[in-house]
Image (cartoon, coloured by chain):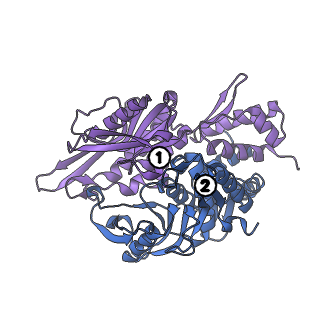
Chain colours: A blue, B purple
């Protein structure tokens, strides 16, 4: 095998590391793969760390000691996150996306690979420190952003269903009160999907009254799983009192009825994204 | 600004390109970003192409001419794809995942960020040439792998629903016959989600009789959209006659009843994955 040059080695390492966010690679695994001395590899990683920082491409994190190594995290700098969500908020504001009944059309955004990847990275950036064992979402619309969040955190995604399905095996069902409609609904999760004592991050598309989110909290309690955080793509400005607290949403939606009997959507980045800038 | 070294520039470019698969970047956009001459940039890209090839990290593709540039594709070499799916097939085979009624537990696989990313890349590799405008799936279990496929192809994902929802706006509903149960079901798609004259790739988790897939074909016909291909994570060995033809599945499932009245799953890579090796 020809000798691998530093520029080749570093390009490959950047790709390998960023393909597996939040996963620790030992230095020796890279030394073996590229037939390189540890000292050279340490230099490579130092340069890579600088590259990621300079060009805003995430974070290369080194962990020292016997169980140490190097990992990639998709950490989005706060200014970048705020700018991205501001731009998205502007796109979603106005009258174009208003649907009859005062709903906002979001399906294209919520299933777009690039947009959901970015949103997932921004959510993950805010929850790396909580180190959840998995991400939980409730079907259907939040699945893409929950998947990208789980991907950035390097953990599995678990999907709760509206009812138990034959292809999920034995399941735990709970009833919950929908915050917005007040109706009683069911939420179901396969027993095989999770284990007692784990921790989870709840990620979903929309928070209004908080009934579904509260249902997910109750469901996790049934499994003796601790919820370490909750994140939503969008929450409504009203009701101001939700059934849950402490959530991090990306955007806040306020649909206002104007004098001429039309409706306009005002979407803005959630306060936590901009308050420390 | 300090001069950017080749190893730094190449590492950053590898990350930027692979973050946006199948998207063309002009050479001049990179030249501007890194303050580099075109000739140097061309050399960088030549080296990057070699790196991707040598380490099996996808494909760096150069397009010459006025509208030219460089792009990254997550092309998985056929041997790698076959090996990955073989290993996955082995994991899924046996009795552990058998559920009452002859179903196989797949939910963990179908929502795992790393596994669905790899499966999506393998599917995308087989359909780059068809250049679909979007990927279509039917809720719920196929959403993650449809999202990763769409991501690798650099196109949006569109999700058909079981019924029309208030937050999707006006929709086209069709009825279809479920291939396995023979029951009549509804499939719904928002009018805003797609445009007449587009092309689409259908991606879903499971193909048994083909009723749902046929329904998706019918739905696309209602919108005057051409289906350029269909891919599934798993198809059943029986019935051998499906309502659709020409699909590419990753795995074939055969659940057999053994003499001792137990059931075992035999999962194998689909023939198209291995026939040209």
Is residue B60 or residue A203 the one in the foreground?
Answer: A203
- The furthest residue to the front: A260
Residue in the foreground of this view, choosing between A136 and B273: A136
Task: Specify the quadrant of the image occupied by residue A222.
Answer: bottom left
Circle 1 chain: B
Specify the label residue A190 is tagged with: none
At which x and y percent is residue A68? 62, 67
Q: Disc 1 marks which residue? A: B169
A274 or A26, which lies in front? Answer: A274
Q: Check the image and report above or below for B126 versus B96.
A: above
In this picture, is A158 found above or below B43?
Answer: below
* Residue at image point 49% right, 48% down: B117
Q: Mark 2: give few (<14), some (14-19) or many (20+) Cα within 10 Å.
A: many
Residue A13 in the image: x percent, y percent? 65, 50
Q: Position of residue B126 (x, y in %)?
A: 46, 33
Left or right: B28, with B141 as reference point: right
Q: Is residue B29 left or right of residue A240?
A: right
Quarter of the view holding residue A47: bottom right
Relative to residue A195, is residue B79 depicted above or below?
above
Label 2 marks a residue whose chain is A
Q: Which image quarter holds the N terminus of chain A? A: top right
Neighbourhood count class around disc 1 (C-alpha, 10 Å): few under 14, some 14–19, many 20 upward: many
Q: Are the residues at dot 2 and dot 1 in contact (C-beta closer than 8 Å)?
A: no
Residue under label 2, please give it.
A265
Pick the residue in front: B101 or A97: A97
* Helix, strand or loop under label 2: strand
Q: Is residue B121 visible?
A: no
Real-space Cα distance between discs 2 and 1?
Answer: 15 Å
- Residue B267 coordinates in the image, percent (x, y): 30, 46
Figure quadrant of the C terminus of chain A? bottom right
Is residue A60 something one can see in this rendering?
yes
């Amino acid at each position: 095998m020809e000798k691998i040059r530093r520029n080749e080695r570093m390009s490959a390492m950047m790709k390998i590391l960023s393909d597996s966010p939040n996963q620790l690679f030992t230095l020796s695994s890279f030394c073996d793969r590229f037939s390189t001395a540890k000292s050279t590899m340490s230099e490579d990683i130092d340069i890579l760390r600088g590259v990621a920082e300079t060009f805003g491409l995430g974070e290369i994190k080194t962990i020292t000691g016997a169980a140490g190594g190097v990992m990639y995290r998709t950490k989005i700098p706060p200014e970048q996150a705020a700018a991205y969500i501001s731009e998205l908020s502007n796109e979603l504001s106005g009258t174009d996306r208003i649907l009859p009944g005062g709903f906002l059309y979001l399906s294209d955004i919520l299933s777009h690979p690039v947009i959901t990847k970015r949103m997932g990275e921004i959510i993950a950036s805010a929850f790396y420190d909580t180190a959840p064992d998995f991400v939980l979402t409730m079907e259907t619309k939040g699945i893409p952003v929950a998947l990208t969040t789980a991907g950035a955190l390097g953990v599995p995604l678990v999907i709760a269903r509206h009812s138990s399905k034959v292809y999920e095996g034995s399941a735990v069902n709970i009833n919950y009160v929908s915050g917005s409609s007040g109706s009683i609904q069911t939420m179901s999760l396969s027993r095989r999907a999770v284990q007692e004592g784990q921790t989870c991050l709840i990620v979903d598309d929309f928070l209004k009254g908080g009934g579904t989110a509260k249902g997910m909290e109750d469901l996790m309690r049934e499994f003796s799983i601790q919820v370490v955080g909750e994140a939503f793509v969008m929450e409504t400005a009203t009701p101001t009192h939700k059934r849950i607290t402490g959530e991090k949403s990306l955007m806040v939606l306020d649909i206002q009825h104007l004098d001429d009997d039309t409706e306009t959507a005002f979407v803005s980045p959630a306060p936590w994204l901009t308050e420390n800038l």
